Image (cartoon, rainbow, N blue to C red):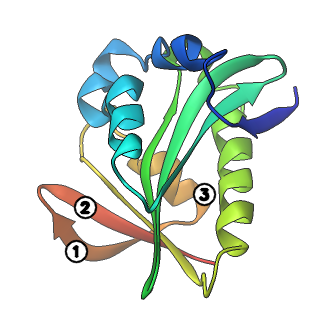
Amino acid sequence: MDVTLVEISAENLRAVMDLEVKPQQQSYVAPNSVSIAQHCFDQESWMRAIYAGPAPVGFVLLSERPSPPRYYLWRYMIAGDQQGRGYGTRALDLVVEHVRTLPSATELFLSYQSGPEGPRDFYAKYGFVETGVEHEGELEMRLVL
């Protein structure tokens, strides 16, 4: 299945907002509607819907601060019923490709909440490593580009 990052528009907004992670994962990521609202008030953010073929299956929100350069995976989710199909890894490949095109991009950061259904293992398998920094109860990881 072809995975793409698609701009969010009036045509796909509702479908993207309706995507949800598994119930046991809901404490680890904000609802997409909250993330979309935050994007509207942040001049240094970039968001896309993650599509598998013709349908949205996930969401990504980046913080892109060019000066000094700091790129941060602010939100990332794959719908609960779409997990385990490789969409998350392929979409993250596309996100990393995008970040590499940004000015002076050498690292991509993220933070996560620790827990049994949390995303840490997914990010570690991808190549993110712990930095030892904690932000408001979340642990930071970094991917060298």
Dot 1 amino acid type? Val
Label 3 or label 1, whichever lies nearer to me, is 1
Q: First in sequence: mark 3 or mark 1?
A: 3
In front of the other: 129 or 65? 65
The answer to whether residue 131 is above or below residue 25 is below
> Residue at horizontal 17%, vertical 64%?
135
Gap in angstroms between the C-alphas marked 1 and 2: 6 Å
Q: Residues within 10 Å of mark 3 (few under 14, many from 20)?
A: few
In front of the other: 84 or 137? 137
Residue linked to disc 3: 126
Q: Residues within 10 Å of mark 2 (few under 14, many from 20)?
A: some
Dot 3 amino acid type? Tyr
Residue at the right extreme? 2
Residue linked to disc 1: 133
Quarter occupied by the C terminus = bottom right
How far from the left and from the top, in percent, is residue 1? 87, 26
